[in-house]
Image (cartoon, rainbow, N blue to C red):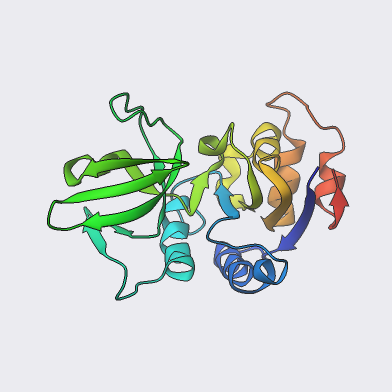
């Protein structure tokens, strides 16, 4: 069972980004969670202010900022740094890593042009030419999170996501949390998601539980 709270975040996506920054730098560490290892930020889409691309840029700077001790590379506009969380985007049977697997960049060798990633107890080496197989994963889409669980999830929901806001997607997002789910977003968007009848109704009292903080599941 996990706790679920609504953290607000205002009506504008920019306010949601600021709310996430406050969670990462203040509230979650005070609750005993390490943002680098315990927290996964989820959202419905990749584009926009509250899409995974922008959020990854913001979160990378907060959680794994540049350091003289960390090697980083920029490939096609995508900045990767030692210590970054990444996600495998395709099934790679040769390396035995698969779509949705999460790992941590251990080393970046600029001489050999190789990146070593830790997946659980095993390491995988990528040539620079194969780096299109991975992407930053401080924030990932709800779709990509299916089948996985995390100690804490932070879920962003705004009207900019309205075309994808369904009860099933929302349910999938918040149930990824093992200990704590935090919803950041506009009440209107949350209400739209939980009232959607496009998907199977798995949780009849979801709206009431999510619009009030501190409830146990």
- Compared to residue 194, the image places residue 37 above or below, namely below
Q: Nearer the viewer, residue 192 or 168?
A: 168
In the rendered image, which quarter contains the C terminus?
top right
Q: Extreme left residue here?
A: 111
Q: How far across and how far down the image is residue 90, in percent?
A: 35, 31
Q: How far across and how far down the image is residue 89, in percent?
A: 37, 36
Q: Is residue 40 left or right of residue 79?
A: right
Q: Is residue 99 left or right of residue 174?
A: left
Quarter of the image for residue 213 reads bottom right
Q: For the image shown, how many numbered marks are present on the structure?
A: 0
Q: How far across and how far down the image is residue 101, in percent?
A: 45, 37
User: Which residue does the image show at 55% across and 43% down from the upper left?
Assistant: 44
User: Which residue does the image show at 40% across and 46% down from the upper left?
Assistant: 118
User: Which residue does the image show at 45% across and 54% down from the upper left?
Assistant: 48
Q: How far across and how far down the image is residue 198, in percent?
A: 68, 26
Quarter of the image for residue 12 reads bottom right
User: Which residue does the image show at 23% across and 60% down from the upper left?
Assistant: 73
């Amino acid at each position: 069972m996990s706790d679920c709270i609504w953290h607000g975040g205002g009506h504008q996506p920019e306010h949601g980004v600021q709310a996430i920054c406050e969670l990462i730098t203040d509230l979650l560490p005070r609750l005993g969670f390490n943002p680098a290892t315990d927290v996964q930020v989820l959202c419905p889409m990749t584009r926009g202010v509250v899409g995974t691309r922008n959020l990854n840029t913001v979160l990378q700077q907060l959680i794994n900022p540049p350091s003289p001790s960390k090697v980083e590379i920029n490939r096609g506009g995508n900045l990767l740094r030692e210590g970054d969380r990444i996600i495998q985007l395709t099934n790679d049977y040769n390396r035995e890593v698969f779509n949705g697997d999460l790992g941590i960049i251990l080393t970046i060798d600029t001489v050999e042009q190789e990146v070593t990633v830790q997946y659980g107890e095993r390491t995988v080496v990528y040539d620079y030419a194969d780096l299109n197989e991975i992407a930053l994963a401080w924030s990932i889409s709800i779709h990509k999170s299916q089948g996985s669980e995390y100690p804490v999830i932070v879920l962003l929901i705004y009207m900019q996501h309205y075309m994808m806001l369904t009860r099933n997607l929302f349910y999938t997002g918040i149930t990824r949390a093992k200990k704590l789910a935090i919803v950041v977003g506009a009440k209107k968007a949350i209400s739209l998601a939980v009232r959607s009848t496009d998907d199977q109704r798995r949780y009849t009292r979801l709206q009431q539980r999510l619009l009030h903080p501190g409830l146990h599941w």
